[in-house]
Amino acid sequence: PDRTGKTFVYITHSLEEAMVMSDRIAIMRAGRFEQIASPDDIYARPKSRFVAEFMGDVNLIDLRLGADGIVAGQVALSHEAGARLGAQNAEGGTLVVRPESMRFLDANTTAEAVAEGVLHAEYGLGSRSQYEIDLPDGTRLTAEVLRENRPAITPGSPVRVGWDIAQCHLIEAH
């Protein structure tokens, strides 16, 4: 509307087209709007698992509140980090972490959220590489790094990945 003074509705199944062309995106599911927001809001702060998965590769980690704070399966997440997420709901929720938000950690580095597992596979995607990491409970996480930042690891190697709370989003349970 800025250049023409008109509003256009463009219907597409192409995520990239929608992200580039839109001021606002409406995600529909079964004939109903699941979320309407700016492209950045929908990508970074989806309101449901459906929207999170619709918007590309994503790690979804189920959280619940326990006596000692947040329990996130095989992910080490402090109570303080959970509070910063806004995990006030007694039922917990789902943590949304995009693959590009994860970083590989060595023995001397840490992050606000940390997971340890085994590298399952590496995929070269041109300018970036994608890694699948299997956690001990069977959860598979995906991490993505720029080609020049690839770690020197091979499938079967133990790995640690982490991310900061500011780089993830909590979908609270209802």
Image: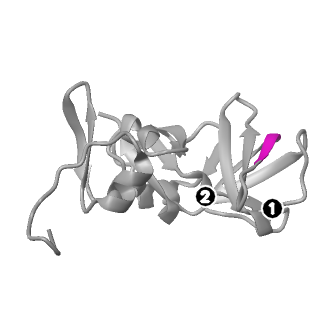
Residue 10 is covered by the magenta coloring: no
Residue extending furthest front? 4
Asked whether 152 or 111 is in front, the reply is 152
Asked whether 115 or 39 is in front, the reply is 39
Instruction: Report the Cα–Cα distance between label 2 and label 1.
Output: 12 Å
The answer to whether marks 2 and 1 mark residues whose Cβ atoms lie closer than 8 Å is no
Q: Quadrant of residue 51?
A: top left
Quadrant location of the C terminus? Answer: top left
Majority secondary structure of magenta residues? strand
Left or right of 24? Residue 171 is right
User: Within 10 angstroms of label 1, few (less than 14), some, or many (20 or more) residues?
Assistant: some
Residue in view at x 64 percent, y 57 percent: 102
Amino acid type at image mark 1: Arg
Q: Which residues are magenta?
A: 119-123
Q: Which mark is residue 150?
A: 1
Secondary structure of the residue carrying tag 2 is: helix
Q: Which mark is residue 100?
A: 2
Amino acid type at image mark 2: Glu
